[in-house]
Structures are given as C-alpha cells and as structure tokens.
Amino acid sequence: MSNTPAIASSHLRKEYGAKLAVKDLTLEVPQGEVFGFLGPNGAGKSTSMKMLLGLVHPTSGTARMLGKPVGHVATRSAVGFLPEHFRFQDWLTGSEFLDFHARLLGMRVARALRISSLLERVDLTDARDRQLRTYSKGMLQRVGLAMAMLNHPKLIFLDEPTSGLDPLGRLMVRDVITELRGEGTTVFLNSHLLSEVEVTCDRVVFIKQGEVAREVNLREHVDTVTVEVCIGSNGAALLPGLAQFGTDLCIHGENCTLTVAEASVIPRIVAWLVGQGLEIYKVASQRRSLEALFIEVLGTERMG
Amino acid sequence: MDILTIAHLTFHEARRRRVVLSGLVFGLAFLLIFGVSMVLINNQLETARPEFIFPQITRAVPGSRQLGLNLVYELFTMAGLYAINFLIVMMSVLTPVDTLSGEIGSGAIQSLVVKPLNRGVVVLGKWLGFWLLCAAYLLLMGGGVLLIMRIVTGYSPENVITGFGIMLLETTALITLSIAGGTRLSTLANGVMCFGLFGLAFIGGWVEQLGALTNIDAAKNVGIVTSLFVPSEALWRLAAYNMQSPIMREVTIGPFSSASIPSNFMVVWSCLYIVVLLGLAVRSFSKRDL
C-alpha cells in the first residue's frame, strides 16, 4: 500500500464551455509527502484540487487517490479536506458541526473524545457551544481544519489553510502540518504564502494554466547561494581575487555580494580574505528564496 | 444511515433557523382565529331560526335542520382545509427552496459531498427531512382544523384518511419539485419556477372547471395537461372531493368543488411524477460540478 501514490493524475483537463481552466495536469504525490501546489491566481489550482476530490468532473484525463479512482466512495473515509472558503452549516455549534461530519465519516466510537481533543488542538474549546455564525473568519478556518482531521486521514487537502489566520494561527497550522507529517499523512497544500510553503513542504510544483511548469524538491534543493561580505572601505582591490569564487560580483559601499554555486565555498572565501590580511566583520549567506524561484519560473512562463 | 443523518441535520436546521418556530406561531394563530370564529358562528347558528340555514332545503324537507347545519359546517371545514392547503403549498416550496442551491452557492456543500457517501444520499436525506417537516405540519394544521370542528360542532368530514393522504401526496410533489430545481437553479430562479408552475396548475385547474361547466372540451384539456406538469391543484381538488358529502359534491363551482372531478389516475400519475423527478434530481446533482 505504501508504494501506491497518494495521488496520481494523468492528463487531467477541464473546460468550462469555451474557457480552459486546466490544460493538462499530470502529477504524482507519494504517500507521506507534504506537497505544495503553487501558482498564480487563475492558474487552475482550485479546479485541479476539486477534480482530485471528485467535486468537479474532468473533461478528460483520469486521477487516482490512494490507489482508487477518484469518486470511489469508501476511499473518501481516509481523506480530509479544508475548502478554500470554509463556509459551513453556520447554524450548528462548533461541536455539533464536528459531530455531524464525524457521523458522515462513519465514526461510531470515541467520537466525543476525538472532537474534544481536536477542538483543543485548534484552540476552540471555549467556543465549542457557540454557533458557527458567531465565529470570526480565523475561528471558522480553524474549526474547518479540525473537521478535515477528524478521521486521522491518510491524505489531507488544505486549500489556503491560513488565509484567514493571524500570525499565531499560522504558526499553529504550521505545527499541525508538521504533526501530520510525523503521523505519515500525505498533505496536499495549496497556498499563496511561499515562506510558509518553504518551511513545511517536501516538494512543490508550480502550475501555470493547469500544467506543471516546474517541480522543485525542497529537501534536496541545491541551488545557488548569495554571499554578502563586509570588506571595508579599501576592498575594491580585492575584487579581482574574489571573482575566482563566484559570479555576479557587486560592491555596495563597504559591502560586496557574489553568487556562489554552493554553501561550502563560503569558508574558502573567508580563509582567502583572512590570508589577504583583511579583518572580517560580517559574512552572510542567503539561499535563493522560493519567492525568487516563483517569479523566475512563472516569469519565464509568461514570456514563453 | 447517512440519509437519516442528513435528514436529521435538515430538521435541525429548520429548527435552528426558526422555520419551525415561525411555522408553529403562525399556524397556531391561524387555528386560534379559526377556532374562535367557529365558536361564534356556531352560537349564532344554534339560536337561528331554521329558515336561516339553507332555506330552500329546510323548507322543502321538514326536519332537515341538522342537514342544513351539517352543510354549513362542511363548508367551513373545507374553507379551513383550503387555507391549510395554501400554507402547506408555501411550506413545501419555500422550506427546501435554497437547501441545495444555497449550499452550492456558499460552498458549504463541498465539505459534505467529499465524505464517504453518494451524492444521491445528500439529495434523498434532505428530501426526507423536508418531507417529515411538511408532513408533520400538514398533520398538525389539518388535524387542528378537524379537531376544532369536531369539538365545536361535532362535525367530521368523510374519508379523512384518503383526503389527507392525497394532500400529503401534493406536498410531496411540491417538495420534490423544489429540491429538483435547486440542483441546477439559483435559489431565486428556483422559487420563481416553483411558484410559476404552481400558478400554472392553479389557473389550469380553474380553466378545467370552467371548461367542464360550459362544456368546452378544449378548455378542460388545457387544465388536464397542466395538472400533468404540476399535479398540485388537481390533487387538492381530488382530496377535497373525497372528503365531501354527496350533497356538497353537487355544488359544482368553487375553490374546493369540482365540475370536472380529477380521476384517481392522478394519484398514480403523481406517484410516478415524484419518483421520476426525485431520480432526475439525484442524477442532476451527481453530474454537476460543485
């Protein structure tokens, strides 16, 4: 079972009349992975997610979830979903809402216990007997997250799970994702907050017009590093020597930046500078952010 | 099992959103006014001279005072049930009108249909919930009218069970129509469609009656055809016809009288209508994107 991918889609396509929402989506997400699904607005992210969940019927192509075709009813008891707009039956109280969904998931035993522990996890114990209509946006999103986790899902879809949350709430979601990973849950995360994706995801794909534009494995991600060195006022003389370590050499006042192939070059730069008799006050390295990558990938896509 | 969970939620929603409360308050207000009116009318009738009540009958047939009184009671019972019929029609169309379209519009339906159940279960569960709600309302209100008549005047109409059974069928047809419309239309469009069709059946029913009275077959057929599309009005007339006494049935024009008596085939047709429409609703909801 563990060799079966959590999600496998093949050439999914969705047209709404003349409008093409998703062109050709082929994806595979292994079980246990925290997977980030990135792309600009209107790239077809939500439609893709809805096709994988069986909410939207694809025009063509197929997809399997946990080894079964999308739409297979029994498989859904192992899946959790937090929808983007987290609109729920708002006349229910928090605990009634979770109990109703637990019933639909076929949970017969220990329902109350699970609900209490989840309400505690998302910090809503005090609000459990209030109707959802009185909840704030953030509270609704948190109760939705609890709903998505009711059945200890093997696969959980989170569509913009932090859009309504304050910084503390975001931290909570980040911790929850880490816990889910620890339990072996596959997480399919759709988010705009790249910094968040960067710290939580194992792998991301960028999609553009419903096609995978680029795939990046963040755990093995080896990419160029920018190094900033404070070389003092008479550092200009050192520039030709520094050029042997990297490219894009630049000088801004007392600081100099250059791009190197990998982080292991940095100690060599420091040793060389010390050898030149320089007193070093600061060396900083910066991995190129996902944001820069996002702009680069989707920027070239746009030009392409 | 899941059907019952969804039906329960539907019932719970009606309670939480004060549909049940307002239905009860206005229903009881109606019964109160009806009851008080009947007490007043009955007091007047008891003391009235025999000639006052249907003088033609009482003069022609000696000792027929009770017969005349019963006719008056029957007339009021039918009027009461006619009003109830309208309340039930409103309830049957309005309570389920946004149950699917509203949740589709807000997206609340999404977290429901990703659960391990067929989409059809959502439709059937909601349908069952509203059916129970409206059936209880019919029983309460219709039963209230009958009980008031019984207590105040001692009168009971004939074939109550058949009559109420047919009215329940009318409710069921309208609930099904409203739910089926909600699988594709917006709440507003669905409401407009349901009341439009109900209005069509209503006017069709009158055209049919006038056609029968004036022996214009074409007009009669117009009515019959419209009642095939929406059987509500024909079912009401059939229910009323069943509960009436032979004398009242001779009164051929009025909101609860029939010059052209709907055939019992209408009951079979309505059952078919409900099953097919419900099947279409399930199919339509299962096929659509959410």
Image (cartoon, coloured by chain):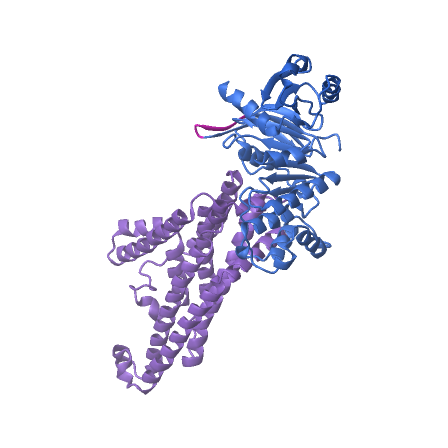
Chain colours: A blue, B purple
Q: Is residue B46 above or below residue A72?
A: below
Q: Which residues are magenta?
A: A17-23
Q: Residue at x 71, y 45 (%)?
A: A152
Query: Is residue A33 located in the magenta-colored stretch of the structure?
Result: no
Residue A124 visible here? yes
Asked where in the image residue A191 lies, by quadrant, the reply is top right
Report the magenta stretch's main SS. Answer: strand
Establish if A268 lies above or below B176.
above
Q: Residue B111: horizontal and vertical position, in percent? A: 58, 45
Taking the image as shown, residue B76 lies to the left or right of residue A132, namely left
Q: Nearer the viewer, residue B213 or A292?
A: A292
* Left or right side of A230 for B74: left
> Does A20 lie within the magenta span?
yes
Q: Position of residue A274 (x, y in %)?
A: 74, 20
Residue A86 screen position, x and y as percent: 55, 46
Q: Is residue A12 visible?
A: no
